[in-house]
Image (spheres, rainbow, N blue to C red):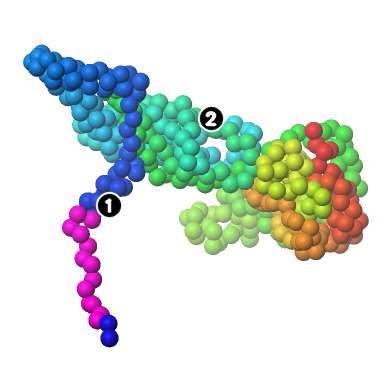
Amino acid sequence: MPRTSNFEPRTSFTAPFRTFARRWSNRRSARPTSEGLRFILLSLAIGIAAINTGNNLLYLLLAMMISLIVLSGILSEQCLRGVTVRRRLPEHIFANKPVTATFTLINPKSYWAAFSLRVLDIVGGVTVDRGAHVFYLPPKGAAVQAYPLLVTRRGRYRVDGIKLLTRFPFGLFVKARTVPAASDVVVYPEIREVPEALRRTLAAIGYDQDLPRRGQGTGLYHLRTYQPGDDSRSIHWKVSARQSMPIVREPEAEDRRRVTLALSTVVPAGIDYSQQALRSPQHPFEQAVILVASLASFFNEQGYAIGLRIGTYAIPHGLGRSQLYQILKALALCSPLPPSEAESAFRGLQRLADLTAQGEFTLLVLPWADSKAEAAAGPVSHVLHAMELP
């Protein structure tokens, strides 16, 4: 029988040091600048000349140049060490609309200042220069650098980390430290102006819809601080207890107009829906998403209660900016479906016919001509195509 051994390899005494060195090297990098490269070559030349000639003056000059290289590495490392960098992105970002983001740099060291710091983002493994540069960061000090951010595509936008650079003190080397500060936000679709002719058409259709009777309403519109003269029966006692101040309920009026926006996501046979095709901003599906987002923004400004249907996914009617942002987030993350999934997607559109029969304003947006999607939706108030928005 083969012998079995109970021997288990022990962890090497140097393993923690190797792990620390590996992590340190992954987050640190240094490369010579063009001036630094010439300085190194000149040092090598002087070293060779000193060895060949035995001249003490050349040895002295070589020692001074090597000491400058070593001192450059020590001071640049001391400059980067301990500096904390935080990124703040806006809560709501729209495609093709510039916003302002900020870097916050904090130097916790008590005596050592940081000099000549550049801050770069790492997006998809590639460094992106935002133009953020801090020349002097005092001990126990902080600095805020704002920079413009423009994202051209809807969907999830992820920033993997931050790279902190310095050329201090002599400009011979670029010392870098990688900070693992990931940020993940959802970029809403681009919002465009609805053409005046389409505005008039939608307004006419909307006013033709039946309105519910006027009344106090039972739905909750929003919560607000109690004001003198408010009915005490409208106080929301649970929220008031949490906020330590009287909060009243404000009901939603039942005479508000309602609109349901629907987007067909099924790609008919013969139309390219590959990821490469979808990257084009001129793709019909991308244009349809922009049209639905623009309509949602338009109806929100008009005070409509807005609902959304994307395939089988539905958002119930609601009011206000929070409802608009919920709709825009769903549009930002939606994607087209192959013809094999048409049956499940069309089931979501069949509800539109019932809503239209109840007198509700319904809009179906088609990325391309699709008679099957129109038949599945049944009679709706209006059908729009992607190219109707310039």
Foreground: 345 or 303? 345
Residue 72 vertical position relative to residue 357 in the rendered view, above or below: above
Question: Which element type, helix, strand or loop, lies under badge 1?
Answer: helix
Q: Amino acid at mark 1?
A: Thr
Q: Is residue 208 visible?
A: yes
Q: Position of residue 50 (x, y in %)?
A: 14, 18
Residues marked 2 and 1 touching at CB (< 8 Å): no
Residue located 19% across and 54% down the image: 14
The residue indicated by pointer 1 is 19
Q: Tell me the mark number nearer the camera, choosing from 2 and 1.
A: 1
Q: Is residue 213 visible?
A: no
Q: Amino acid at mark 2?
A: Pro
Residue located 68% across and 51% down the image: 334
Question: Which element type, helix, strand or loop, lies under badge 2?
Answer: strand
- Lower sequence index among marks 2 and 1: 1
Foreground: 201 or 131? 131
Which disc is residue 148 wearing? Answer: 2
Foreground: 24 or 181? 24
Q: Quadrant of residue 161?
A: top left
Label 1: how many residues lie within 10 Å, few (<14), some (14-19) or many (20+)?
few
Span shown in magenta: 3-15
- Residue 145 lies in the magenta stretch: no
Q: Position of residue 377 (x, y in %)?
A: 86, 58
Instruction: Indicate the quadrant containing the N terminus: top left, top right, bottom left or bottom right.
Output: bottom left
Residue 163 vertical position relative to residue 304 in the rendered view, above or below: above
Which disc is residue 157 wearing? Answer: none
Q: Quadrant of residue 236?
A: bottom right
Residue 165 vertical position relative to residue 186 in the rendered view, above or below: above
Label 2: how many residues lie within 10 Å, few (<14), some (14-19) or many (20+)?
few
The answer to whether 55 appears left or right of 5 in the picture is left
Residue located 47% across and 55% down the image: 244
The answer to whether 295 appears left or right of 375 in the picture is left
